[in-house]
Image (cartoon, grey):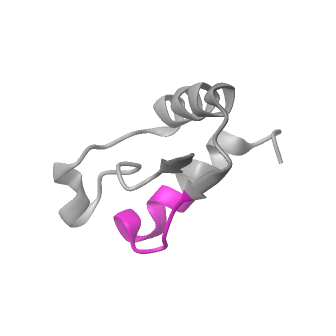
């Protein structure tokens, strides 16, 4: 099961998909981990890299 981060940040063209912030990302990640995800889909192109910054905040303390 995978968790996608394209909605994180909401910068540029992806703003139409969503604008998940740090707090929301942490909550979503907790739900997904509880459900058994084993992959996180991210890319430096998502919100000009902001998605990866938000993911970093969301997984802090879980690495």
Total labels: the figure holds 0
| 8 drawn magenta | no
- The stretch in magenta equals 41-52
Tell me where residue 1 appears, x and y as whole percent. Answer: 57, 46
Q: Residue furthest front?
A: 1
Q: Which residue appears at 58% of the width and 50% of the height? A: 55
Q: Quadrant of residue 27?
A: top right
Q: Nearer the viewer, residue 6 or 56?
A: 6
Q: Is residue 42 magenta?
A: yes
Q: Position of residue 17 (x, y in %)?
A: 22, 48
Q: Position of residue 36 (x, y in %)?
A: 67, 34
Specify whether 41 is left or right of 45.
right
Taking the image as shown, residue 46 lies to the left or right of residue 56, namely left
Residue in the image at 24% along x and 59% along y: 14
Is 7 left or right of 5, judged from the image as shown?
left
- Decide: is 39 above or below 59: below
Q: Residue furthest bottom?
A: 45
In the image, taking residue 61 as reference, residue 21 lies left or right, namely: left
> Which residue does the image show at 31% across and 43% down from the upper left?
19
Q: Position of residue 33 (x, y in %)?
A: 67, 33
Q: Examine the image and state in which quarter residue 39 appears.
A: bottom right
Name which residue lies at 47% across and 68% down: 49
């Amino acid at each position: 099961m995978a968790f996608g981060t394209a909605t994180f940040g909401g910068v540029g063209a992806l703003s139409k998909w969503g604008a998940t912030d740090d707090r929301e990302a942490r909550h979503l990640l907790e739900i997904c981990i509880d459900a058994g995800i084993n992959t996180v889909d991210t890319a430096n192109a998502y919100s000009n890299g902001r998605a990866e910054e938000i993911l970093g905040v969301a997984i802090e303390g879980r690495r």
